[in-house]
Image (spheres, rainbow, N blue to C red):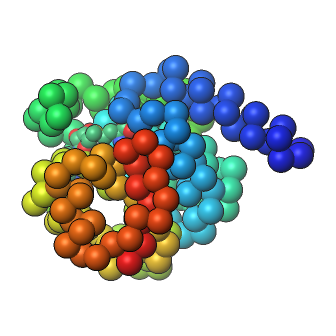
Amino acid sequence: MNGEKMKQKVNRHLKTVLQNTEGYMTFEEMELLYKCAMQSELPIVEIGAYQGRSTVVLGIGASEGKDAMVYSIDHHPSYTDGGKQFGYQDKRPLIDNLVKFELIRKVDIINIPSYGVNVCKVFPEGIGLLFIDGKHDYQSVMQDYIRFGSSVKGDILFHDFTWEGPRKVIKEFGLKVVESAGNLARTEL
Ligand SMILES: C[S@@+](CC[C@H](N)C(=O)[O-])C[C@H]1O[C@@H](n2cnc3c(N)ncnc32)[C@H](O)[C@@H]1O
């Protein structure tokens, strides 16, 4: 398949995901997430699945790229963030979406809080791509970055990177935004 045909196929794929899953990623953000997932050889880790829009994008990207496993961490606590309501009710749609897109084997859901994950034990070979999209307050983003960041051998992506929490973490830890799409940033140390 030539480059243009491949691009059209990916676009169709991502549009189907956008139309069939609830979530907070825009099409352009999904494109960047997909591209990064394709390139990862080591496990891909997502913090914050919600109903699985980004999770499905990571799963499709990994399947069509270097076939890394995707681990999505979300214990579905009940809270509001940025005016949106999250909770246990999001768990069923997440599973349904993974089944619908035939990703139930490619994506493992880790149903515990990010701060409960023993990162070195669970990912002894390191993490190829880390996508941080859990709670967005400074403390939560910082804890996620500190706990997982040192195991990452590739990129770290922050969603909503212009919001105060992620923005402060990126600045304080001297991360460089090397690429962005919408409110999704790809960063490097
Ligand atoms: C903004 S939503 C994620 C949106 C999703 N990435 C998408 O593209 O639609 C944030 C999610 O993070 C989860 N979450 C919040 N704190 C968490 C934590 N400490 N560990 C794991 N998941 C967490 C929430 O349950 C919620 O589903």
Res 36 → quadrant:
bottom right
**Residue drawn 44% across and 60% down?**
186
36, 112: nearer the viewer: 36
Residue 169, relative to residue 105: is it above or below?
below
**How far from the left and from the top, in percent, is residue 42?**
54, 70
**How far from the left and from the top, in percent, is residue 18?**
51, 26
**Is 13 left, or right, of 176 in this rendering?**
right
Residue situated furthest top in the rendering: 19
Q: Quadrant of ligand 1?
A: top left
Residue 104 in sight in this render: no
**Residue drawn 52% across and 20% down?**
19
Residue 92, relative to residue 143: is it above or below?
above
**How far from the left and from the top, in percent, is residue 157?**
40, 58
**Residue drawn 67% across and 33% down?**
11
Residue 88 in sight in this render: yes
**Is 102 left, or right, of 53 in this rendering?**
right
